[in-house]
Image (cartoon, rainbow, N blue to C red):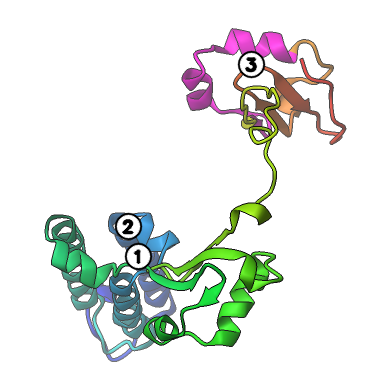
């Protein structure tokens, strides 16, 4: 375990071990921080990400810096992060500081210029984000707000919203979604258990197709228990 301590020089094996240990350690700390901090970088997440990156990066490039101290500091910061995140759920003033309320940028087709400065964005950036939402005329926007995560939520005015079957009072089929139950010949047993079926049921469904399970690169199942099989030849099979 000499690669943990600071040394005048490290061997190639010790550098490799430092990299492996640091990689596994970062995976564990990222998991401890939670999925939200990965999918949506908030103010506190940004600070933690920068700090952790510097703490771990230095021992990986300087043999005179020990890895143990960096890992202890990282653990302390993660514990503080989790604590502050939990306290923000209990203390409203802390939540408002870490997750500020959304800022209205456009209301009833009018740009709220005083709020652009609050969000620290330019008019060009606002129009760029509106173009991403396929908005060609800002007067058609009923509401556009700047979210704490740095994204803009756009809501079109009622006359310019897409027509839905409910608007036309049309009868529709229940919503169903296809989920992969076999990938590269491997069965997702947790999904099979979730839909309340067993392996015999799946084998019976596959039996209607020429493919064996080990030859199936993908098979999907819907909520109405229809199984769609794709054989190794990548030719679409008919639903069973």
62 relative position to 91: left or right? right
Write down the quadrant of residue 12 in the picture: bottom left
**Is residue 134 highlighted in magenta?**
no
In the drawing, what numbered circle is on residue 28? 2
Q: Which residues are magenta?
A: 181-206
> How dense is the environment of label 2, judged by Cα within 10 Å: few (below 14), some, or many (20 and up)?
few
Where is residue 238 drawn, in percent x and y? 84, 21
User: Closer to the camera, 167 or 13?
Assistant: 167
Write down the quadrant of residue 207 in the picture: top right
Q: Are marks 3 and 1 in contact (CB under 8 Å)?
A: no
Q: Is residue 1 visible?
A: no
Where is residue 30 drawn, in percent x and y? 34, 61
Task: Name the residue located 58 percent from the left edge and 13 percent from the top edge.
Answer: 199
Q: Nearer the viewer, mark 3 or mark 1?
A: 3
Q: Which residue is mark 3?
A: 225
Q: Secondary structure at mark 1?
A: helix
How far apart are labels 1 and 2 at the CA level?
5 Å
31 relative position to 207: left or right? left
Which of the two discs, 3 and 1, labels the residue nearer the N terminus? 1
Examine the rendered structure and indicate whether residue 222 appears above or below residue 41: above
> How dense is the environment of label 1, judged by Cα within 10 Å: few (below 14), some, or many (20 and up)?
some
């Amino acid at each position: 375990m000499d690669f943990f301590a600071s040394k005048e020089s490290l061997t190639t094996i010790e550098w490799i071990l430092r990299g492996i240990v640091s990689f596994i350690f970062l995976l564990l700390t990222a998991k401890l921080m939670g999925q939200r901090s990965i999918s949506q970088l908030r103010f506190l997440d940004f600070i933690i990400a920068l700090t952790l990156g510097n703490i771990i990066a230095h021992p990986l490039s300087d043999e005179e810096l020990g890895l143990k101290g960096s890992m202890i500091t990282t653990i302390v910061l993660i514990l503080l992060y989790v604590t502050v995140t939990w306290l923000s759920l209990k203390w409203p003033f802390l939540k408002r500081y870490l997750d500020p309320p959304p800022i209205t940028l456009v209301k009833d087709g009018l740009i709220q210029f005083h709020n652009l400065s609050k969000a620290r964005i330019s008019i060009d950036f606002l129009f760029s984000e509106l173009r991403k939402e396929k908005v060609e005329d800002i007067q058609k926007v009923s509401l556009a707000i700047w979210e704490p995560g740095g994204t803009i939520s756009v809501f079109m005015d009622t006359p310019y919203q897409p027509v839905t079957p409910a608007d036309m009072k049309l009868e529709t089929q229940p919503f169903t979604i296809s989920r992969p139950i076999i990938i590269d010949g491997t069965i997702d047993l947790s999904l099979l258990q979730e839909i309340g079926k067993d392996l015999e049921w799946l084998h019976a469904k596959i039996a209607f197709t020429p493919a064996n399970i080990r030859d199936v690169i993908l098979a999907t199942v819907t909520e109405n228990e229809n199984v769609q099989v794709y054989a190794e030849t990548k030719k679409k099979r008919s639903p069973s």
